[in-house]
Image (tube, rainbow, N blue to C red):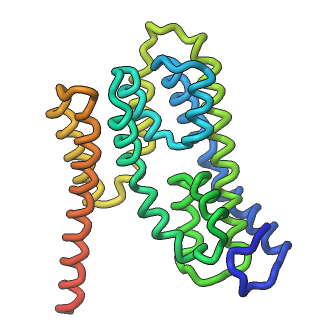
Amino acid sequence: MTQMHPDLPADPQADARAWREGFHTGLPTLFGIGAWGMVVGVAMVKSGLTVAQASGMTLVAFAGSAQLASLPLIAAGAPIWVIFLTALVVNLRFVIFSALLGPHFSRLPLWQRFYLGYISGDVSIALFLQRYPSPAPEPGKLAFLKGLMYPNWFAWQVGSLIGIFLGSAVPTEWQLGFAGTLAILCIMVPLIINSAALCGVLVAGVTAVLAHGLPYKLGLLAAVVAGMLTAMVCQETMEKRRRKGSGHG
């Protein structure tokens, strides 16, 4: 495996150990990732996409939240710019993730950073940053990240493709929208790690209800934007108060 820092000597044994460590660290999350992918796969087919379209979407996009957010817009015949903008806003969190990972892997070739960005996921990045909070070069760091990301990507794709191919066998009257809602809740609840995130979720929920009547499901986009802005403002306010408190101390 390619080392993440050119100043470190190649150490295949350290890479192998780190890859196994990354795999075992992410192993408990793989079943949930696969199950969520299956729900999204079924939802794509039930939203009117063909098997080929749904398969292409999951293989190219690899973004469950953005896929679920886009499906009702596709079904409603929303303009392509609305669908694209919604998916973009939902995935803005990866800008933050990129800023956190950047110091660790800034010396990698551009193509490899793009590649790692494609296979990255929320859980994988969180687990990596728990293991390596410092951006200082360490042997096996890149291998550990790949040990998290490769199985995560594979679990999602397998679950999603199973859902896609089974979707045609699920009766339409089952209305799987509720299952999709439960899947999103399973991902959202662990992310409410502080008051700022909770405020963002509450504002997004209220906005979604109040803006429900907007055309092309624009209420969803408004809710995402309002929730993200609220969370960022609350986080910044909390950090300012914390700095003032430590300054007085």
The residue at the far right in this view is 13
Q: Residue at x 67, y 34 (%)?
A: 158
Q: Residue at x 22, y 36 (%)?
A: 208
Q: Residue at x 56, y 33 (%)?
A: 57
Q: Quadrant of the N terminus?
A: bottom right
Residue 120 picture location, percent across and down: 58, 55
Q: Nearer the viewer, residue 18 or 64?
A: 64
Q: Is residue 84 above or below residue 239?
A: above
Q: Is residue 182 above or below residue 5?
A: above
Residue 140 picture location, percent across and down: 73, 73
Image-quadrant location for residue 146:
bottom right
Q: Is residue 116 above or below residue 246?
A: above
Image-quadrant location for residue 207:
top left
Residue 188 picture location, percent across and down: 39, 45
18 with respect to 198 (left or right): right
Q: Residue at x 46, y 69 (%)?
A: 99
Q: Nearer the viewer, residue 153 or 248?
A: 153
186 with respect to 123 (left or right): left
Q: Is residue 188 above or below residue 51?
A: below
Q: Quadrant of the C terminus?
A: bottom left
Image-quadrant location for residue 219:
top left
Label count reads 0
Residue 70 picture location, percent across and down: 41, 33
